[in-house]
């Protein structure tokens, strides 16, 4: 269980992030068109998983914008923005912002992605949502970087995530 803060107040997650050197668990997530996809659909590409509580908060929106900008400069790399937001909200946000270099995926159906990866918030006002996490995987789905952001309102370390690519 990771111990985090939200506005300085302690909150906890359901477990620990997967370890570097392990494979991404292949979980089905929902795309903007309501079809499903899984990480195996992206094998052969490097992945940046930008995981956050909700697209409708300032820090989450900023991380999507910054990773969208970075993604356009990365070869053989896909940025997946994952939250429990409904696919309609994710699509609306990216459409309004003109963000075309990221793929939004939703874990709204059963939250299995957050539970399996130990990043679901279990208490406090955001209980049930995902904590702010970045996971980077290589072309084979092997995790090469993780970051659990200690204060939910803080941005992730973009440079550290991109440096491993």
Image (spheres, rainbow, N blue to C red):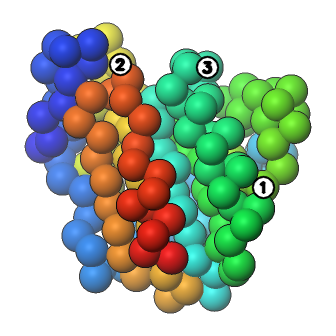
In the depicted structure, whether residue 129 falls above or below residue 24: above
| Residue 151 percent coordinates (x, y) | 27, 28
Image quadrant containing the N terminus: top left
Across and down, in percent, residue 34 comes to 77, 45
Query: Residue at label 3?
Result: 56
Within 10 angstroms of label 3, few (less than 14), some, or many (20 or more) residues? few
Q: Nearer the viewer, mark 1 or mark 2?
A: 1
- Look at 27% across and 13% down and name the residue there: 7
Q: Tell me if residue 61 comes above or below residue 80 in the rendering.
A: above
Quadrant for residue 43, please give it. Answer: bottom right
Q: CA distance from mark 3 to mark 1?
A: 19 Å
Looking at the image, which is closer to me, 77 or 123? 77
Q: What percent of the width, then of the height, locates residue 138?
A: 49, 81
User: With 132 as the anchor, is 83 left or right in this view?
Assistant: right
User: Which residue is label 1 attached to?
Assistant: 101
Circle 2 is placed at which residue position?
Answer: 126
Q: Earlier in the sequence, mark 3 or mark 1?
A: 3
Q: Secondary structure at mark 1?
A: loop
Residue occupying the point 25% across, 56% down: 17
**Does label 1 or label 2 sit earlier along the sequence?**
1
State the CA–CA distance, disc 2 to disc 3.
Answer: 13 Å
Can I make out residue 58 in this image?
A: yes
């Amino acid at each position: 269980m990771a111990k985090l803060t939200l506005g300085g107040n302690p909150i906890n997650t359901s477990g620990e992030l997967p370890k570097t050197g392990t494979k991404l668990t292949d979980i089905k997530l929902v795309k903007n068109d309501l079809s499903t996809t899984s990480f195996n659909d992206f094998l052969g590409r490097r992945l940046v998983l930008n995981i956050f509580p909700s697209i409708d908060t300032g820090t989450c929106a900023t991380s999507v914008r910054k990773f969208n900008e970075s993604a356009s400069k990365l070869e053989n790399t896909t940025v997946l923005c994952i939250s429990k937001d409904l696919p309609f909200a994710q699509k609306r946000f990216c459409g309004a912002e003109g963000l075309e270099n990221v793929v939004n995926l939703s874990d709204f159906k059963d939250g299995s992605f957050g539970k399996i990866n130990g990043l679901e918030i279990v208490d406090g006002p955001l209980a049930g949502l995902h904590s702010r996490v970045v996971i980077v995987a290589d072309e084979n789905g092997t995790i090469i970087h993780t970051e659990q952001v200690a204060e939910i309102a803080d941005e992730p370390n973009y440079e550290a995530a991109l440096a491993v690519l």
